[in-house]
Image (tube, grey):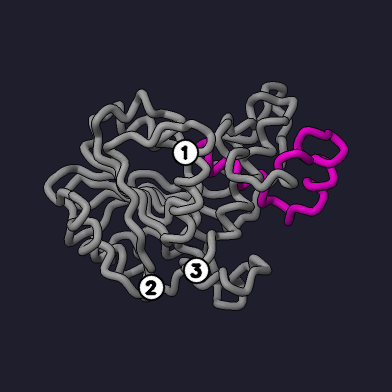
């Protein structure tokens, strides 16, 4: 993932969230009304035209749009539930153009929130938020980081992270682009720098071998990581965590893509998964 320019993948994800808000079926709208703010004018204006929206949807890889809708809705739920359950601190690992701290700004109160990502992506994000008059609360801290090279927790501690506070780590759409070594090392570092009851929410793909890794088509953002199918629970346990919730593609479709009339809005590739895990 490039550290010198804003993430194109983050831009694509924002565009898909923005696109969903034009769906006739309210049940599948992400309701992320900030997402469109991050789009260049040419990408934003075409969303107003139904024919253009249909053209865009016809070019999206099968299942990706539905996956982004489901992922947004699921992590929204995890985010909201964390605050309802008194979470003390939150860290976004690879925050991209995540808008939850701004969409739910009345919910977060004074809870300390850290957004960790490349400096280029963060600078663009802050510029857009300020340009659109969206409040960046004082308890939101941006931590510029290269996940492959930097000591994340050193940077977090320097910015006020407190290891004895129960923390939710949101790792949305990131593990795909990291090596397995980096993913495992991150899980280890989180375990070593958080208290029992802290949680990690992340998504990933299952694989039978490296040939199963999907492609983004973006050279700088190559897919590198997956968990072998049938070994998810053991992967979680071996890294010192317990599974709180695992949702596979069928679960996503049932929870987030089934319309009121029972018809499925769309399908998701079977390799896609959500995990919420907790430090033992």
Please tell me which residue is depicted at 22% across the width and 53% down the height of the picture: 159
User: What residue is drawn where x is 56% and y is 69%?
Assistant: 221
Where is residue 230 drawn, in percent x and y?
47, 63
Instruction: From the image, state whether disc 3 or disc 2 is nearer to you.
Output: 3
The tag on residue 130 is 1
Q: Residue at x 55, y 72 (%)?
A: 208
Q: Which residues are magenta?
A: 44-73
The numbered dot on residue 148 is: 2
Circle 2: is it few (<14), some (14-19), or many (20+) Cα within 10 Å?
A: some
Q: From this viewpoint, which residue is outermost toward the front?
A: 131
Q: Secondary structure at mark 2?
A: loop
Nearer to me, 43 or 278: 43
65 drawn magenta? yes
Q: Is residue 88 left or right of residue 100?
A: left
Name above or below for residue 203 compared with residue 22.
Answer: below
Overall secondary structure of the magenta stretch? helix
Q: Is residue 183 left or right of residue 152?
A: right
Q: CA distance from mark 2 to mark 1?
A: 29 Å
Please give the residue where the numbered disc 3 appears in the rendered image: 4
């Amino acid at each position: 993932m490039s550290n010198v320019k804003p993430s194109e993948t983050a831009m694509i994800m924002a565009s898909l969230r923005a696109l969903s808000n034009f769906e006739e079926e309210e049940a599948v709208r992400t309701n992320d009304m900030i997402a469109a703010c991050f789009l260049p004018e040419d990408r934003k204006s075409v969303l107003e035209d139904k024919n253009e929206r249909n053209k865009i949807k016809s070019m999206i890889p099968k299942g990706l749009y539905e996956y982004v809708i489901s992922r947004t809705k699921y992590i929204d739920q995890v985010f909201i539930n964390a605050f309802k359950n008194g979470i003390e601190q939150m860290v976004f690992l690879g925050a991209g153009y995540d808008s939850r701290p701004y969409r739910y700004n009345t919910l977060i109160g004074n809870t300390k929130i850290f957004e960790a990502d490349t400096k280029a992506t963060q600078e663009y994000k802050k510029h857009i938020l300020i340009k659109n008059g969206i409040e960046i609360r004082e308890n939101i801290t941006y931590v510029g980081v290269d996940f492959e090279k930097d000591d994340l927790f050193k940077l977090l501690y320097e910015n006020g992270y407190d290891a004895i506070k129960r923390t939710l780590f949101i790792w949305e759409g990131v593990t795909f682009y990291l090596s397995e070594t980096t993913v495992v090392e991150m899980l280890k570092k989180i375990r070593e720098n958080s208290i029992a009851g802290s949680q990690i929410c992340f998504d990933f793909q299952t694989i039978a071998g490296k040939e199963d890794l999907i492609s983004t088509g973006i050279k700088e953002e190559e897919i590198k990581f997956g968990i072998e199918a049938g070994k998810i629970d053991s992967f979680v346990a071996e890294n010192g965590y317990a599974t709180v919730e695992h949702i596979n593609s069928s679960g996503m479709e049932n929870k987030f893509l089934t319309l009121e009339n029972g018809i499925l809005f769309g399908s998701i590739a079977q390799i896609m998964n959500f995990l919420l895990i907790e430090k033992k």
